[in-house]
Amino acid sequence: MSKKEISTRNAPSPVGPYSQGIVANGFLYTAGFGPQDPNTGAMADGVEEQTRQVLRNIRSVLEAHGASMDDVVKSTVHLQHLDRDFAAFNGAYREFFAAPYPVRTTVGSTLAGILVEIDVVVALRP
């Protein structure tokens, strides 16, 4: 199996030994992204705006490989406050996807200073 790294300055740089994205076996897998603005490092306060920034970061990685949010088949979402923030998160998330929506797992997680982290799997077009 071959792997190809996907990297862009339009998404936050990794802070550890991982890639922003990897292409393997017809799929693109992204790292879990937080809500950092890639240019300033700033983060919004609320879960809605943090969700939007996370998804803009993910979209940047997909676009670096010629893919789009329409190609996402699976997302995994971690929310710091699952019960409190789910409805607001879900509203912002919906802005980035159209039916048929990707399958999704959403879990409550202890996150370091952020409210939401998301990673996705993309089915690449032949």
Image: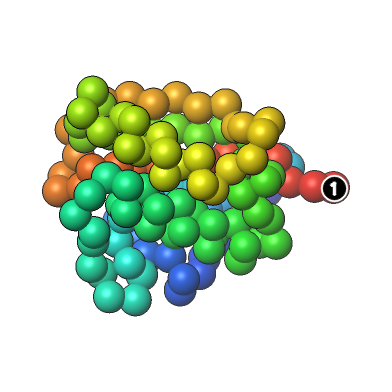
Percent x, y of residue 69: 61, 49
Percent x, y of residue 98: 64, 40
> By what rule are the colours in the image chosen?
rainbow
Residue 36 vertical position relative to residue 54 in the rendered view, above or below: below
Mark 1 crowdedness (10 Å alpha carbons): few <14, some 14-19, many ≥20: few
| Residue 101 visible from this viewpoint | yes
Circle 1: element type: loop
Residue 43 vertical position relative to residue 70 in the rendered view, above or below: below
| Residue 17 visible from this viewpoint | no
Task: Judge by depth and name the residue closer to the eye, 24 or 41.
Answer: 41
Q: Quadrant of the N terminus?
A: top right
21 to the left or right of 54: right
Label count reads 1
Q: Residue furthest left?
A: 113
Residue 75 vertical position relative to residue 7 in the rendered view, above or below: above
Percent x, y of residue 105: 45, 24
21 to the left or right of 111: right
Q: Residue at x 42, y 44 (%)?
A: 92
Q: Residue at x 45, y 73 (%)?
A: 9
Q: Mark 1 points at which residue?
A: 126
Q: Residue at x 62, y 32 (%)?
A: 101
Q: Residue at x 26, y 33 (%)?
A: 85
Tell me where residue 119 sits by quadrant. Answer: top left
Q: Which residue lies furthest to the right in this view?
A: 126
Residue 61 vertical position relative to residue 70 in the rendered view, above or below: below
Q: What residue type is labelled 1?
A: Pro
Percent x, y of residue 117: 33, 43
